[in-house]
Image (spheres, rainbow, N blue to C red):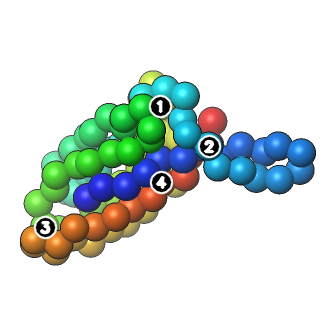
Amino acid sequence: MFGDVRRRVHSDGKTVSQLPTETLEVIAVSGNQRFSSATGRAGKFLIVLPPGTFDVWVERAGQPVSPRQRVRLDANVDHRLDMPVSY
């Protein structure tokens, strides 16, 4: 699974999306399995997961900063997931 993490900020009454200014952790959990991957400088992430259903969210300093998304992954299929965060 791969994708982008973008920070939602409010500016002049509008919601805009911008790159995060720090490294964040993308977390994926299925049953008792927990996987994580740090974002790169441009907010991109790549996390290698086995097939299955996962709850995925983003954390900043150990605290969730995005809603959880449920994702079903099939074998040998790339899955793109964009994660909006707020903090």
Question: Residue 57: where, in percent of width, then height?
Answer: 41, 50
Q: In this view, does 47 lie to the left or right of 66?
A: left
Residue depicted at x 63% and y 36%: 87
> How much space separates mark 1 and mark 4, taking CA atoms?
13 Å
Which mark is drawn over residue 51? 3
Looking at the image, is mark 3 or mark 2 nearer the viewer? 2
> How much space separates mark 3 and mark 2, taking CA atoms?
31 Å
Do the residues under discs 4 and 2 have CB atoms within 8 angstroms?
Answer: no
> How much space separates mark 3 and mark 1, taking CA atoms?
26 Å
Q: Residues within 10 Å of mark 1 (few under 14, many from 20)?
A: some
When the figure is inspected, residue 17 is found, relative to residue 72, above or below; the finding is above
> How much space separates mark 1 and mark 2, taking CA atoms?
16 Å
When the figure is inspected, residue 77 is found, relative to residue 85, above or below; the finding is below
| Upstream in sequence: badge 3 or badge 2 | 2
> How much space separates mark 4 and mark 2, taking CA atoms?
12 Å
Q: Classify residue 49 by image quadrant.
A: bottom left
Looking at the image, is mark 1 or mark 4 nearer the viewer? 4
Question: Residue 28: where, in percent of width, then height?
Answer: 28, 51
Q: Circle 1 sits on which residue?
A: 60
Q: Circle 4 sits on which residue?
A: 83
Q: Classify residue 44 by image quadrant.
A: top left
Q: Please, what secondary structure does the residue beneath circle 4 have?
A: strand
Residue depicted at x 37% and y 37%: 39
Q: In this view, does 64 lie to the left or right of 26?
A: right
Identify the amino acid type marked 2. Answer: Gln
